[in-house]
Image (cartoon, helix red, strand yellow):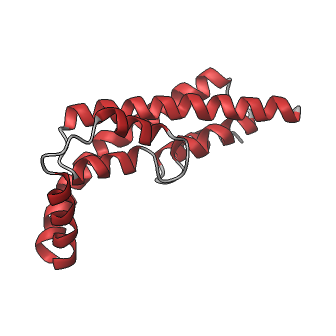
Amino acid sequence: MSYAPLVFLISLLPVAELRGSIPLALGLKVAPPLLVFLICVGLNLLVIPITFIGLDLLAPPLIRRSKRMASIFAWFSKRGHGRNWGMVGLALFVGIPLPATGAYTGVLIAYLLGMKRGQAALAIATGVVMAGILATLATLGIISFLGI
């Protein structure tokens, strides 16, 4: 039985994303490293539009029904209004291959701060590719160091 589909679907899970799927796929040798990288990054890139759409659908009703949610969104909107948060900063944040710094969090930050979607999506995608490269190289380095 091949675990490849399950391993690659981890790229779509919050927190794990490609930071979890790349090391797992390379460790289990489900595919060559370049293919692992391309599949995991490609799947993680799907998170960007899906999460923006999900926030568009879920946030307004949550804000209307919950005073707490309304105050959280208002707080972020007030703090982000008129500030240049920088697409480079967003890309670097997403590009750090640590839990909770991936595409989901990048989209949430961009959404809460009212960043322009196209620019934010490009910055998040850049960060996803950077994280994929770092996770792949780090995993290959560890595998070769351990002689696995």
Percent from the top left, x then y, of residue 47?
A: 37, 42
Compared across the picture, whether 15 is left or right of 148 comes to left
- Looking at the image, can residue 43 be seen? yes
Q: Which residue lies furthest to the right in this view?
A: 147
Between 83 and 26, the one lying in front of the other is 83
Rendered position, 15 above or below 28: below
Percent from the top left, x then y, of residue 107?
A: 31, 46
- Residue at the (79%, 33%) spot, across then down: 143
Between 27 and 94, the one lying in front of the other is 94
Between 133 and 45, the one lying in front of the other is 133
- Looking at the image, can residue 30 be seen? no
Task: Using the rendered view, name the quadrant where residue 126 is placed.
Answer: top left
Name the quarter where the C terminus is drawn. top right
Name the quarter where the N terminus is drawn. top right
- Residue at the (25%, 53%) spot, across then down: 54
Percent from the top left, x then y, of residue 64?
A: 11, 72
Task: Using the rendered view, name the quadrant where residue 63 is placed.
Answer: bottom left
Rendered position, 63 above or below 123: below
Task: Using the rendered view, name the quadrant where residue 141 is placed.
Answer: top right
